[in-house]
Image (spheres, rainbow, N blue to C red):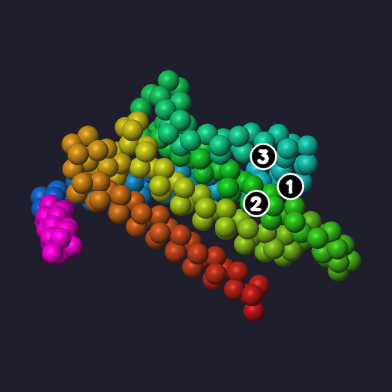
Amino acid sequence: MEECGLCYQFMKEVISLSQKIIAYLSANMTTYLQAVQTHLMISIQALWIAVMIGIPLGIFCSRNEKFSKYVTGWFNSLRIIPSLAILVLMIPLMGTGKTPALVALTILAVPPILINTIAGFAGIEASLYETAKGMGMDEKQIFLKIEWPLALPLMLTGVRTSAVEVSASATIAAYIGAGGLGNIVFTGLGLNKAELLLIGGVSVAAISIGAELILGTVQNAVTKYQRD
């Protein structure tokens, strides 16, 4: 009987919470969609900038071992700093708002892309270069036909990792005024409203999982020839 009572109480709370979620979304759908859009836009922008920085810098580092040690050491040190700490450090430097949040998220997104790019290019066997040169290929042809295709899987893995990290960390970016789904989460924490925490948390999780699935599909499609 006691177990039945607990199950009944649990179901009652679930139904009540579901009703609150539906009521909130019905009354605030525009606000919710704007939060999702803001979250997606700042995540995509940060990831794009990180790709534009991480891949060229990674290629350069793979060709310059001494420079690579300094760059990878610096970016690796950034990876051990909590996301919130980097975001907070932006406040005295750039104030609050979307711009400092974008800079902070870009800093968080660069290391996986950079390190995987370096690993992808540095891991190519020297015998492949010798074979390519023996076939009469110049540096441009070697890069486009040998290096880039072989390094691409690891580079895409770095992009996938960064995409998941950025989409999750963008929630914390609301702490410095970036907006997005983090506003809903922090409002839920402040007002002790579980429905807001669920709406914000589940939405962020869905975006992160979606990013992983989409980029995973792209990676499988791009590298299909290597598996055939």
Amino acid tagged 2: Thr
- Which of discs 3 and 2 lies nearer the camera? The answer is 3
The local secondary structure at tag 2 comes to helix
Find the distance from the CA under tag 3 to the CA under tag 2.
11 Å
Q: Which residues are magenta?
A: 1-21
Q: 175 or 57: which is nearer to us? A: 175
For marks 2 and 1, the one nearer the N-term is: 1
For marks 3 and 2, the one nearer the N-term is: 3
Find the distance from the CA under tag 2 to the CA under tag 1.
8 Å
Residue 175 lies left or right of residue 100; in this view the side is left
Q: Which mark is residue 117?
A: 2
Residue at 44% x, 64% y: name it: 213
Q: 114 or 41: which is nearer to us? A: 114
Query: Which residue in the structure is indicated by mark 3?
Result: 72
Residue at 18% x, 62% y: name it: 3
The local secondary structure at tag 3 comes to helix
